[in-house]
Amino acid sequence: MIGFSKIVSALIAAAFLFPQPASAEPPPPCLTVRGGQTIQATVLQTRPAPEELLARLVYAETQSTGFAEDERVHQAIAWGVMNRARLGDASLAMRNRYGHGLSGVIFRKGQFNPAVSARSPFSRDFLCPRQEASWRSALQAARIALEGRDNPFIQTDWERRHQLALVVNFYYPHSPQAREPVAPWEHSRELSFIGEIAVGGSLLPAERIRLYRLATPPRLSNP
């Protein structure tokens, strides 16, 4: 019979040979807007790393979709935000439209309500992400999108040639804030609905998040 000490030694050795995933990183500290400050000022004064800032937004936006457990939704939102930021780096028109850099995109007025409006029911999720599993998923999605490799939205010839994705708008049909099953811009000439798309290894249903590509590529500053 194998002794207890040998079993323990074997388990320890196995842990080194086949390490388990690192313990989950806890959600960041909760923040409180004080003294007439904006959400933007409250968050940026903590000097968050880019991955935390993007993960906060992904977490809050995903809570609003009604599918906070779906990692594909986290990833789609993270990529969409970074698509805007990268287009802004390459095009003055896109920078003026969506904001400059990650922070400029996230806090752009009229875009992501959880980050700009204290009246948004999901601003508290942006300031204080509590659900650990959803936070882990948001953080992982943020890291993948910030790294920028294998962008699932790069599909057209223009996108492949410039390595920039034109998928910049998304709509959440099951959000409590959604007034219609499709976005108000569904039939806009500026945007094209792209239907289901593979994200994270499987198809993301359009009923969970509707994604839209710019119909006309922007003029690049440095083509």
Image (cartoon, grey):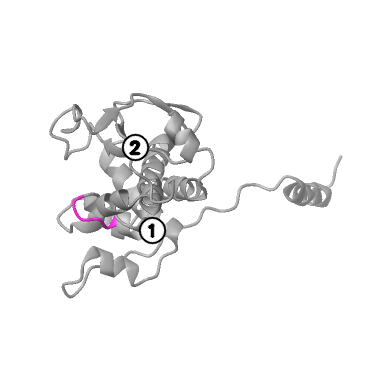
Instruction: Magenta stretch: give its range.
Output: 106-110
**Label 1: element kind:** helix
Q: Quadrant of the N terminus?
A: top right
The answer to whether 95 is drawn above or below residue 167 in the figure is below
Q: Which residue is mark 2?
A: 217
Q: What's the magenta bit mostly, secondary-structure-wise?
A: loop
Q: Amino acid at mark 2?
A: Pro
**Is disc 2 surrounded by few (<14), some (14 to 19) or many (20+) residues within 10 Å?**
some
Q: Secondary structure at mark 2?
A: loop
* Residue 54, x across and y down, in percent: 39, 54
* Mark closest to the chain's N terminus, 2 or 1: 1
Q: Is residue 122 visible?
A: no
The residue carrying pointer 1 sits among few (fewer than 14), some (14 to 19) or many (20 or more) residues within 10 Å by Cα, namely many
Residue 214, picture quadrant: top left
Asked if 75 appears above or below 27 in the picture, the reply is above
Residue 213 visible? The answer is: yes
| Residue shown at the point (30%, 46%) measured from the top left | 61
Q: Nearer the viewer, mark 2 or mark 1?
A: 2
At 23% across and 31% down in the image, what residue appears?
Answer: 173
Vertical side of 217 occupied by 54: above or below: below
Q: Is residue 77 left or right of residue 32?
A: right
Q: CA distance from mark 2 to mark 1?
A: 28 Å
Q: Which residue is mark 1?
A: 53
